[in-house]
Amino acid sequence: MISAYSWVVPLLVVLPLIGAGLTLAAAGRTAIQRAVSLTVLGAMLVAAAVLLVAADRIGPQVMLVGGWLPWEGVVLVVDRLAALMVIVSTTVTMAVLGYSIGQGQSSFDDESDGHSPLPVFHPSILVLAAGVTTTFISGDLFHLYVGFEMLLAASFVLLTLGGTPERVRAGTTYVLVSLLSSMIFLVSIGLVYASTGTVNLALLSQRLGDIDPGTVGLLHLLLLIGFAVKAAVFPMSGWLPDSYPTAPAPVTAVFAGLLTKVGIYAIIRTQTLLFPHSRFDDLLLWAALLTMIFGILGAIAQDDIKRMLSYTLVSHIGFMLFGIAVGSTAGLAAAIFYTLHHILVQTTLFLVTGLVERVGGSTDTARLGDLARISPIVGVLFFIPAMNLAGIPPFSGFLGKVGLVQAGVAEGGWLPLTVVGASVLTSLLTLYAVARVWGRAFWSENPEGITGQGPLRGGHHEALGLGVLVPTIAIVVVGVGITLAAGPLYDVTTRAAVDLALREPYVVAVLQGGMP
């Protein structure tokens, strides 16, 4: 039976693609591009909120694209997990877009002559949004692959904006790693289809149990490897700290918030729906442990704020992987909650780092100092998400980590308990890393005598302005709002985890969607 809200589901992909076309057609008309982009993202946010309410009250919302049956064509599915991911991803994309618009002549669209020298920014950010959303609502593996490729193409354009040698090198590394991941994923899809005759996730959940366990193990391992590269899971995470910091602040922020999370989402979806209680759960626990430790050790060795945050991004992927590996309802609920929290906090910190660079002229803590006096508001905007990332009570980072620790302790066994210990150590080292930046950049003696809005590239001085402050403040407030609304949100993530563990709500919704 098709729900009355099913027609809203494809809008999550159609709207940003239409918007991308309109903004490309409006190249050179910056005001039109901005209006279209913000309108599209706002409409996506409303649609996702409607679908979250529908999925929470009625069940997963399914759209059979083109009227094809589920086993014949593309199926789009929005359950609680997908809706939550779309809402948070759209929120941070809007904040990043607002920040970019607020940068004015220092951004990607220079209004000094009424034209934009880089008119592809708005189309690219909308295609990226469409690709990310496609991965979240895809009901089959091949369409999930299509979403990955959409965001890969858009992210390469965004990563190399400006065409500097440093950005092109970073973009080349990113593309090569992503293409390797895509090849592994595509080979996996081919093997899955050859083994089961379908790539539909709901049908796969029924058919994988009928084939040879050794074949299932191979398919599972290949999919995990492909998704782990996307998610920057150790030891496949070395590319990330070298790729993200070279991009402009808004691009780095949206990358840090979203791109690794599509890999985490894919692991959650396939691990719960296709391979529950698999033989690789211990492997995932080891991956979580090593990702936490090696990521945070890299972070505390960095002097540059962007590189430090890039390594903490890798490290905290381990927390999400930990909850997935535990596999219990409590573990999955905590992993989902922590993923939502981390998207917001990591994006916020990279946007604030952009403010630091505008005020101090650098993100190298050896060249910064006294920023708390020079720009108190930037100090506050950095301090709040930094403490949230470190997991200081009562922030959402603390609540998510407590949920993960409780799930690990309840699971028992020496390996889960070892990961629990590693997670506590990682949290302490994260606090050390951000406190070190806080002390050196904001409170230490200024090494270069910066006395005002810091030297930007080219030696010019420029006030921060409300254009960049407002979206940054807004996303900091949203991050704090996650803490204030943690109880209801955690209830929703728990219900999402229950459905993931049961599998039946998703499978029945998809298969009944094809019945008259």
Image (spheres, grey):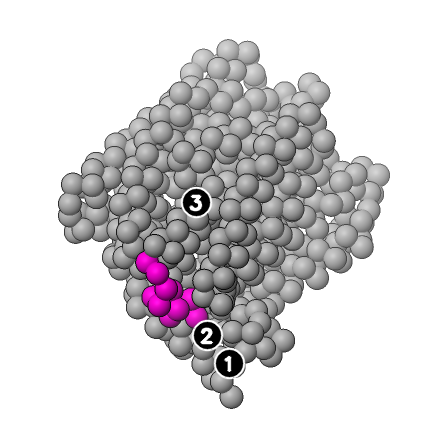
324 and 388: which one is in front?
324
Question: Does the stretch in magenta take in 205?
Answer: yes
Check disc 1 and give the amino acid type.
Gly
Q: Which residue is mark 3?
A: 225
Under mark 3, the amino acid is Ile
Q: Where residue 471 sits: x, y (%)?
A: 56, 45
Residue 52, above or below 282: below
Most foreground residue, 20 or 286: 286
Which residue is disc 1 drawn over?
A: 514
Would residue 5 be found to the left or right of residue 461 on screen? left
Dot placed on the residue nearer the N-terminal end, 3 or 2? 3
- Where does label 2 land, which residue? 510
Q: What is the x, y in percent for residue 78?
A: 48, 67
Q: Decide if residue 25 is on the left or right side of residue 11.
A: right
Q: Quadrant of residue 213?
A: bottom left
Mark 1 vs 3, N-terminal side: 3
Q: Is residue 227 visible?
A: yes
SS under mark 3 = helix
Q: Which residue is the extreme one toward the right?
A: 113
Mark whose residue sits in front, 3 or 2? 3
Residue beneath the point at 55% across and 37% down = 177
Judging from the image, what secondary structure is the residue with disc 2 in?
Answer: helix
Start-end of magenta stretch: 203-213
